[in-house]
Image (tube, helix red, strand yellow):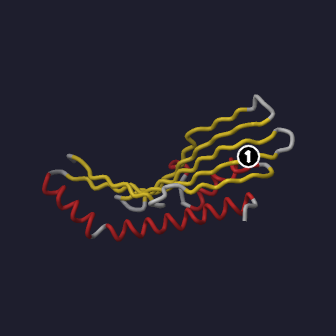
């Protein structure tokens, strides 16, 4: 293999993020519910699920927290769906009231390996004229799953 053509498609283009804000009772419960939702909705296995950063600051009465998760799912040998969720919030230690902001993002990375200049040209033509419909179907599926994830988070937090 000489190289590969890579294409990244944002699922929520032109806006690449969904932002959810919650003010109320016990916002830290998102730290427990989101990993399970990502695994079940996007069919992500535990080997393809990553908790990248977890930060907790409980020096003051208001506990601050930050967490990020990523999950990937291979649609086929060329396309891989990635979902990212970031959470940042504050919760009062005594009253358990607080707020949280949740960022949802998904993108698809498509790779076409090639071995020489002729193969590269053929891969470009195949990607543009034949594989684009398949990529569009993956994009629609990922968008539906992101909507389901958003609705589940809203339902479990009582944001409906």
Name the foreground residue: 143 vs 13: 13
For label 1, the crowd category at 10 Å Cα-Cα, with few meaning under 14, some 14 to 19 and many 20 or more, is many
Residue 93 horizontal/vertical position (percent): 82, 38
Q: Is residue 34 left or right of residue 133?
A: right
- Badge 1 marks a residue whose secondary structure is helix
Q: How many marks?
A: 1
Q: Quadrant of residue 57?
A: top right
Name the foreground residue: 99 vs 2: 99
Residue lying farthest front?
14
The residue to which callout 1 is attached is: 28
Q: Is residue 54 left or right of residue 72?
A: right
- Image point (82%, 45%), residue name: 96
Residue 27 horizontal/vertical position (percent): 74, 49
- Image point (60%, 55%), residue name: 19
Residue lying farthest top?
59
In the rendered view, would you say 140 is above or below 6? below
In the rendered view, would you say 127 is above or below 60? below
Residue 3 horizontal/vertical position (percent): 23, 47
Q: Is residue 153 left or right of residue 140?
A: right
- Image point (26%, 69%), residue name: 129
Q: Quadrant of the C terminus?
A: bottom right
């Amino acid at each position: 293999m000489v190289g590969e053509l890579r294409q990244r498609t944002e699922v929520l283009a032109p806006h690449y993020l969904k932002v959810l804000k919650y003010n109320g009772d016990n916002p830290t419960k998102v730290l427990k519910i989101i990993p399970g939702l990502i695994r079940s909705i996007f069919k992500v296995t535990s080997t393809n699920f990553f908790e990248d950063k977890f930060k907790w600051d409980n020096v003051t009465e208001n506990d601050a927290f930050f967490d990020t998760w990523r999950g990937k799912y291979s649609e086929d040998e060329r396309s891989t769906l990635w979902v990212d969720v970031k959470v940042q919030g504050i919760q009062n230690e005594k009253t358990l009231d607080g707020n949280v902001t949740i960022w949802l993002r998904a993108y698809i990375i498509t790779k076409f390996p090639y071995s020489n200049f002729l193969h590269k040209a053929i891969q470009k033509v195949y990607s543009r004229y034949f594989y684009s419909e398949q990529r569009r179907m993956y994009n629609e599926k990922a968008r539906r799953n992101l909507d389901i994830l958003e609705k589940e988070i809203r339902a479990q937090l009582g944001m409906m």
